[in-house]
């Protein structure tokens, strides 16, 4: 009873709001436009987020703490020191992988001279420094363990010093010149292939997605506008509403522009993940506007425009408000400090702003647009040209093309029963009412739909069991870029080894103790080691000196003999000595470098290696940490990237339980929860089968999938559950007739808007398209196939309600017979009836 009272109260409130908006349409139409222009004008000076690490690396990760500790122990001066690889932090650098077309040996005389010429050209770059820091070989063939026979690829790395902002600007310019030099050198040497890469390449290629998407997004907008106008059109030129399709898209655009202006004014910075926000607002706004238009078509034409608008708001705004609240709660949880991925947090925050203004603009701008078109319809004006439509007798004297353009039904030409169904000539309405609703509820069709659903669940489960979390940054950049080409070459030629992992001992230990020495060698067993410690022990053995020396002898031999030798001098950078109060020298910290040999280096494999070493550091007697710059991006990435989705699912479930007190029947929320779970399960499974990994972009799309499903399925389920009398099949048909047109219109427009996104040459948009397409497709499958079939034989039962109501009617008839009827003949007639 309480739920029904609240339901009626909310409907009455929205009806009054609709009447108020219809009384002041000019204000509610102009205010959103003015606000959008004022706020959106600041978007022309938007700033771009330049730090990819800030966006995609977990904010609170152990790897960042480890990096700070490493930098404090071993500060790097890249202008002087030789590094084995990108160890503590990449900083500013330039790299190039050189390969041959014919898989020739890159170590022969011809290719060696070519590499030296390239090296000479690079080190003579203006504002560059002579900082050749080493090379790597790929595709290596060996004669023996100590001798390399040939190598198919060579990688050169050049590190730059960038201590302050001025040096950083010079280094950035050097990186640009570095790529230009490699490009010119490639043109003059066609027998080799070069893949340049710099520290800024990832950021440039990440933001490049926005530039290459502009043309495709414009095409998408044109297609959506065209189809939206067609979906709202009819042969009847008065009742056709093409401008409302255009104004629906304009409503979404105004909301997106307003949100962009607010983001810019509050200091937000743009990044390529924002490309998904317009599609989220589009999916939410399209259904809201089409549902309002569908409700408008159900109102009586002889009513005043204000009364029709009030009826539209009472009929459609309650469900639209609840779905908007779902958006705000799910994305709001994602925008909270609990989200550890900054890109996901910013995306959710900006999506909340855009959805909120989209809701307000649908109420105000689109609601007032309905009012204006209502007055045009009442005056029998053309829906496009807004001129008065002549009477049928006048129209008969005009040419055929003129009669075709101005075809309309006049109220005096129709009976009362036909007047309320003036919109049934709409193509989609006819299709759903006369053909599809009867076909999908046919007894012979239902078994095939159930079988198809079981196949759907089977494939979804198969994909769900193969879900893979991925932190590969190449999945967010545009294709055919330096990042993708370099990554492919590195994977091909240098994938047999993991990145160089720094092994840092941050306390003073008994290096001279043979037990400690055995423990150290055991910890690094199975790795290819670049270690001062192992080299020093071998050095002592070659001199026939026991490695178990006293502390003073061990340290003195290390400082005065081992590190003085030219072949071991570079190890001095890996050891920190400290003098104690009694002038005794002690090794307080040291480092060594490990490389894991693997069959194929994958992020997941490297992540497990990282976790194994960390667990070992907690149990071992020697206090050490391990670090590589890539650890910052992958550190507990799986748990961090999935957290927004888990929190959003919990918040969505909580909101569905809470809103059970606001809807007229709690069974609506039960069905809605099951539908959302089925859709999300299917999307995750098919997403994996379509080679989309669980990363930041796909998780954000899955959060949106919860809301998109509720948007489309909630009105359908509400109409079915609240229906009384008749049968389940009858109410399934009725629900499809009432809400199916709006769902179908929004789905067609949304899919047409997504199609150009598939052609954008970017991995980010590829993930975005595949996830959004699967969400729309699976939701459409549930709305038009699964739910209409399953609801015909599962609760709530309609027959029981009918049986309960029948005795009440019989009692009423009996009462009339006993009290009001005096004539025996009349009583007999009523009794017979």
Image (spheres, rainbow, N blue to C red):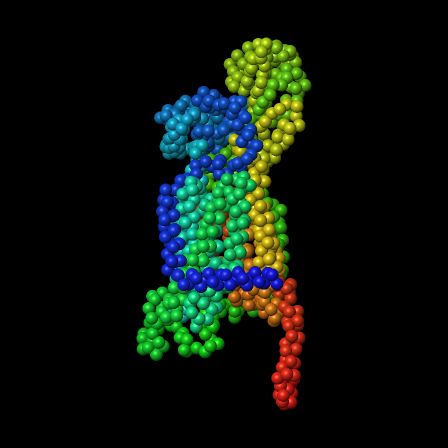
Is residue 685 left or right of 404 when viewed as pictured? right
Q: Nearer the viewer, residue 772 or 410?
A: 410
Q: Is residue 679 above or below residue 149?
A: below
Q: Is residue 502 above or below residue 221?
A: above
- Residue found 59% across the figure and 35% down from its top: 607
Q: Position of residue 577 (x, y in %)?
A: 55, 15
Q: How many marks?
A: 0
Question: Could you say which quadrant of the image residue 188 lies in?
Answer: top left
- Residue found 55% across the figure and 56% down from its top: 710
Q: Nearer the viewer, residue 28 or 561?
A: 28
Q: Nearer the viewer, residue 292 or 781?
A: 292
Q: Position of residue 760 (x, y in %)?
A: 44, 47
- Residue found 35% across the figure and 26% down from its top: 126
Q: Is residue 126 above or below residue 647?
A: above
Question: Could you say which quadrant of the image residue 181 lies in?
Answer: top left
Q: Position of residue 588 (x, y in %)?
A: 58, 18
């Amino acid at each position: 009873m309480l739920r029904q009272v609240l339901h009626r109260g909310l409907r009455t409130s929205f009806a009054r709001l609709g009447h108020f908006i219809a009384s002041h349409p000019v204000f509610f139409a102009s205010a959103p436009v003015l606000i959008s222009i004022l706020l959106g004008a600041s978007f022309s000076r938007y700033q771009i987020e330049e730090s990819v690490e800030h966006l995609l690396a977990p904010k609170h990760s152990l790897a960042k703490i480890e990096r700070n500790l490493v930098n404090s122990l071993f500060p790097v001066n890249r202008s002087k020191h030789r590094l084995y690889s990108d160890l503590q932090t990449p900083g500013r650098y330039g790299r190039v992988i050189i390969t041959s077309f014919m898989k020739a040996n890159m170590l022969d005389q011809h290719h060696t001279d070519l590499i030296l010429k390239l090296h000479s050209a690079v080190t003579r770059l203006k504002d560059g420094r002579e900082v050749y820091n080493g090379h790597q070989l790929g595709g290596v063939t060996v004669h023996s363990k100590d001798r390399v026979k040939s190598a198919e690829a060579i990688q050169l790395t050049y590190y730059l010093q960038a201590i302050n902002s001025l040096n950083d600007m010079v280094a950035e310019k050097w990186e640009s010149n570095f790529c230009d030099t490699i490009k010119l050198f490639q043109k003059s040497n066609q027998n080799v292939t070069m893949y340049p890469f710099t520290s800024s390449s990832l950021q440039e290629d990440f933001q490049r997605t926005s530039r290459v998407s502009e043309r495709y997004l414009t095409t998408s907008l044109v297609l959506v506008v065209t189809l939206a106008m067609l979906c709202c059109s009819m042969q009847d030129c008065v009742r056709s509403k093409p401008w409302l399709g255009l104004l629906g898209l304009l409503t979404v655009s105004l909301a997106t522009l307003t949100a962009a202006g607010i983001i810019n004014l509050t200091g937000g910075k743009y990044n390529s993940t924002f490309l998904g926000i317009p599609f989220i607002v589009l999916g939410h706004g399209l259904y809201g506007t089409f549902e309002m238009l569908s409700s408008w078509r159900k109102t009586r034409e002889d009513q005043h425009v204000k009364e029709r608008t009030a009826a539209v708001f009472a009929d459609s705004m309650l469900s639209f408000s609840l779905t908007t609240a779902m958006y705000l709660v799910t994305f709001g949880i994602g925008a909270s400090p609990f989200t550890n991925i900054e890109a996901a947090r910013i995306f959710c925050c900006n999506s909340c702003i855009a959805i909120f203004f989209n809701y307000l603009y649908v109420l105000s701008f689109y609601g007032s647009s309905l009012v204006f078109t209502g007055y045009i319809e009442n005056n029998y004006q053309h829906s496009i040209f807004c001129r008065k439509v002549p009477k049928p007798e006048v129209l008969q004297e005009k040419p055929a093309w003129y009669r075709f353009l101005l075809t309309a039904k006049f109220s005096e030409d129709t009976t009362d029963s036909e007047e309320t169904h003036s919109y049934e000539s709409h193509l989609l309405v006819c299709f759903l009412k006369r053909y599809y609703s009867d076909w999908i509820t046919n007894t012979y069709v239902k078994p095939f739909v159930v079988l198809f659903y079981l196949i759907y669940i089977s494939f979804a489960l198969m994909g769900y069991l193969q879900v893979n979390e991925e932190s590969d940054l190449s999945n967010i950049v545009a294709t055919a870029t330096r990042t993708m080409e370099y990554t492919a070459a590195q994977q091909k030629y240098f994938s047999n080894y993991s990145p160089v992992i720094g092994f840092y001992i941050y306390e003073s230990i008994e290096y001279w103790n043979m037990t400690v020495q055995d423990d150290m060698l055991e910890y690094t067993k199975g790795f290819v080691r670049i270690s001062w410690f192992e080299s020093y022990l071998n050095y002592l053995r070659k001199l026939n000196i026991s490695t178990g020396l006293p502390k003073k002898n061990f340290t003195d031999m290390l400082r005065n003999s081992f590190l003085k030798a030219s072949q071991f001098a570079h190890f001095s950078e890996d050891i920190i000595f400290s003098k104690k109060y009694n002038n005794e020298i002690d090794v307080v910290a040291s480092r060594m470098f490990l490389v894991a040999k693997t069959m194929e280096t994958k992020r997941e494999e490297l992540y497990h290696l990282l976790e194994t070493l960390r667990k070992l550091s907690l149990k071992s007697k020697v206090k050490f940490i391990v670090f590589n710059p890539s650890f910052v991006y992958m550190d507990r990435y799986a748990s961090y990237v999935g957290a927004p989705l888990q929190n959003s699912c919990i918040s969505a479930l909580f909101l569905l339980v809470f809103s059970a007190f606001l809807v007229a029947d709690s069974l609506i929320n039960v069905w809605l929860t099951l539908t959302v779970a089925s859709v999300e399960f299917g999307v995750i499974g098919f997403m994996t089968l379509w080679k989309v990994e669980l990363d930041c972009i796909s998780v954000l799309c899955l959060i949106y999938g919860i809301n998109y499903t509720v948007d489309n399925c909630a009105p359908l389920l509400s109409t079915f559950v609240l229906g009384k009398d008749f049968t389940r099949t009858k109410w399934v048909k009725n629900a499809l007739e009432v809400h199916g047109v709006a769902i179908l219109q929004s789905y067609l427009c949304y899919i047409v808007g997504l199609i150009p996104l598939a052609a954008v040459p970017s991995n980010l948009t590829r993930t975005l398209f595949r996830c959004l397409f699967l969400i729309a497709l699976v939701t459409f499958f549930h709305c038009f196939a699964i739910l209409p079939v399953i609801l015909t034989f599962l609760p709530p039962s309609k027959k029981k309600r009918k049986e309960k109501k029948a005795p009440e009617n019989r009692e009423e008839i009996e009462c009339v017979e006993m009290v009001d009827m005096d004539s025996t003949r009349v009583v007999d007639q009523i009794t017979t009836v």
